[in-house]
Amino acid sequence: MDNQRIAQMLDKTFAWTVSRTFSREEAEELTQEILFQAVKSIGELRDETKFEPWFWRLADITLKVFKRSKAKLRSYISFDVISNVTYRDNYDFIAREEHKQLRSRIAQMSATYRDIIVMYYYDNLSCKAIAQKLGLPEGTVTYRLSMARDKLKKECSQMTETALKPARLNITIKGDFRNENEYPPLFINDALSQNILWHAYREPKTVEQLSILTGVHAVYIEDRVENLVKHEAVIQPTKTTVQTDFLIFDETTYGDDIVEEIVSTVSEKLYKAAKSLTEITISSGIQTAGRSFDEIMCFLSILLLGSTVPDSMPEYLPGKFHHFPRRYDGYRWKYVGFKDGISGSKVSMGSGRSMNNFEQDKMAHYHFNFAPFTYRKILFDYELDVCQAVLQKVVLDDKQKEIAATLIASGFLAKTESGETICTVPVITKEQHDLFVQNAIDIFADVLPLYSELVKKFVDGYVKIFPKHLKDDALFNGFNIFAAMFKAIVADWIKKGMVSIPDSAVCDGLFVL
């Protein structure tokens, strides 16, 4: 009975495919494919009363796959022979020696114009016949054909340099993500996707514009755009345009003079306060794990700035921006990109925080990545479990011993001459941290308001260098600058010989909460 109902759809299906293909042969081929897919999938239909809606949804899906395969074939076949077409209306807009460039340019056009050009010149169809095939008013087809001619006349004589200088981006993510096998940037990190993201960053672009800028056929641009939309890397401001939906850091710089003003104004004041706070904190008995005074001072200072949000900057309160959107994979994160060769500005900084699985005496790992300190990975929860077990001198089981071995190799743990396993990361207990916070409030009372005022001045200009639709992301990153500006201050301390940071030093610590 099911197969009989499908067979009864033959005439309707053929009529449907005729209006959506370039020739009778293609319509027959597509009709056969739709009926085949229906027979193969009919078992999935649970409600027989919904047969036709199910059938036409399947037909639409099959059409998309069919058109994509035919479009790619047509981009190599149809346009290779288009130079043999006689232009029936004597519209003299291109010379014979430019035919090769013309074929390439047609292939780069968006489907809105490309399909009409191909049907008119290659399939020798009239505007009326094209209108019937595409289900459009004849006047619309005539207008689009005229527009397509004008585009070809204008642009076939131009060569866009950007197609010869493809961009390279380093794309990563910020936020809560735990599935390493499905790391989002992996799906948008091919060269063509990167160039689409770059060219559509500051202003929305059409498929046609992106094809010109990248020098790649529009059918491939369309495929990549569909993938970028799926993985939430672009937005669609209009039906025909896309724009990159995350911050990309490039050669654009802002406020070096303001950075220098901040550094010259607060560097020595901040040093004096940080030195006093570190002396008190170390005297409380924290486990410094062999780190120098200057290393501990930098860690405590950035920890303080990273957790301090002054009342004078209410628009940057983390409560407004700290929740990343829930993405297509269920996690909360945001892409961030860096143009090739851009390693970060004076006020950029990486940071991370993780926690273990203990029900009591939970432990957190804080890490800050900025020059002159080197990068260190964040500990996973199960690794923190092992670190805490080592600190509590708990006997490790076989699995924990394996994890401990990897932590020794990566420098988080070490073996003493007596064979004892020790932690090589500074550790601060809850009591010591509470004392640290209490003292910080008093010691930094004079310098933080001044620092806040200067940073706000910087951020107000900083957010303007990014596209307007990314203002919230820029503000969130601007909030982070309150801590990241410390990178420029530490550079000043080093330049003046106020601190000495050993080579390969890292800036991290463990907190028992």
Image (tube, grey):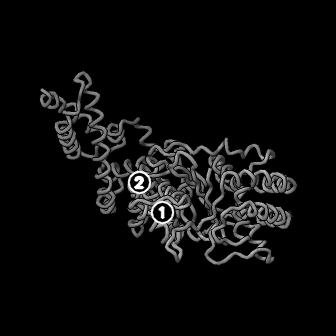
Image height of 366 relative to 12, above or below: below
In which quadrant of the rendered view does residue 266 lie?
A: bottom right
The percent position of residue 326, horizontal first and vertical second, equals: 51, 42
Image height of 275 relative to 475, above or below: below
The percent position of residue 499, horizontal first and vertical second, equals: 76, 74
Q: Secondary structure at mark 1?
A: helix
Can you identify the residue that label 2 sits on?
A: 182
Q: Which residue is found at the position 85% from the left and 57% from the top?
A: 447
In which quadrant of the rendered view does residue 105 lie?
A: bottom left
Q: Nearer the viewer, residue 248 or 505?
A: 505
Q: Secondary structure at mark 2?
A: helix
Q: Which residue is found at the position 51% from the left and 61% from the top?
A: 213
Can you identify the residue that label 1 sits on?
A: 214
The percent position of residue 234, horizontal first and vertical second, equals: 51, 49
- Among the two numbered marks 2 and 1 on one chain, the one whose residue lies closer to the N terminus: 2
Check whether the beta carbons of the residues at disc 2 and disc 1 lie within 8 A of each other: no
Q: Residues within 10 Å of mark 2 (few under 14, many from 20)?
A: few
Q: Which residue is found at the position 40% from the left and 70% from the top?
A: 97
Q: Residues within 10 Å of mark 1 (few under 14, many from 20)?
A: many
Decide if residue 87 is on the left or right side of residue 199. Answer: left
Q: Nearer the viewer, residue 9 or 503?
A: 503
The quarter of the picture where the N terminus appears is top left
What type is the residue that disc 1 sits on? Thr
Q: Which residue is found at the position 46% from the left and 52% from the top?
A: 178
